[in-house]
Amino acid sequence: FVSSCDYKSSLIYEKIDLNSDLNELSGLEFFDSKLLTHNDSGFDNILFVSKLDNIKFKKIKINHTNNIDWEDICLDNEFIYLADVGNNYAFRKDLKIYKISKNFKLVDSIKISYALQNNFENKPKNKFDAEAIISYKNNLILFSKNRIDNESFIYQIPKDVNNISLSPIDKVTFKGLI
């Protein structure tokens, strides 16, 4: 991370050397005055945590999870939600959102599938890949990454389910991928 000071805008930047283990950051969350992040697909099942006043990331292994394609992270007052929902080629049948306690122990997971997906052949352009998640009241909101027409489907997931087949509740079009 490299930055500089711009006296006209009052922004102060500094150079921060990140851990060499931080290879492909995919999600970032602010939690308990700390930064919380993770690598994308194919890396260890580790969250990285750092205080804001001294950016040195500590590794925390999340037992009983796999990082197949971790895309994003969000939280609410009780839990951290880690979205293992990357599905770049539309063939995954093991999509899930991990529910993790704030002391970094796996509590549960929500298995997800797409109601409209009936074909699991390798398709690099598909509508069944998700990239972002937020927590809103009693639900998680999942946003798809659609390489066909840049429409992002929006899915609502109740936080208290263990298994759900998703149908879009809405969509939004961007000039690029979400």
Image (spheres, grey):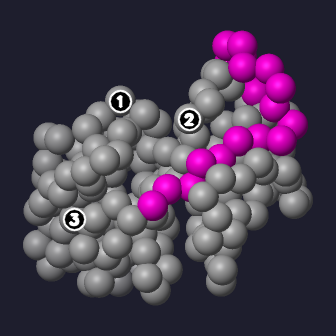
Left or right position of 91 against 84:
right
- Magenta-highlighted stretch: main secondary structure? loop
Local packing at callout 3 (Cα closer than 10 Å; few below 14, some 14-19, many 20+) is many
Residue 117 figure quarter = top right
Q: Which residues are magenta?
A: 108-126
- Pointer 1 or 2: first along the chain: 1
Query: Mark 1 = which residue?
Result: 42
Q: Amino acid at mark 2?
A: Asp
Front residue (pair 6, 149):
149
Q: Amino acid at mark 3?
A: Val
The residue lying furthest to the top in this view is 122
The answer to whether residue 117 is magenta is: yes
Name the secondary structure under disc 2: loop
Alpha carbons under labels 1 and 2: distance apart: 14 Å
Name the secondary structure under disc 3: strand
Query: Mark 2 = which residue?
Result: 94
Query: Mark 3 = which residue?
Result: 49
Alpha carbons under labels 1 and 3: distance apart: 19 Å
Front residue (pair 9, 58):
58
Q: Is residue 63 visible?
A: yes
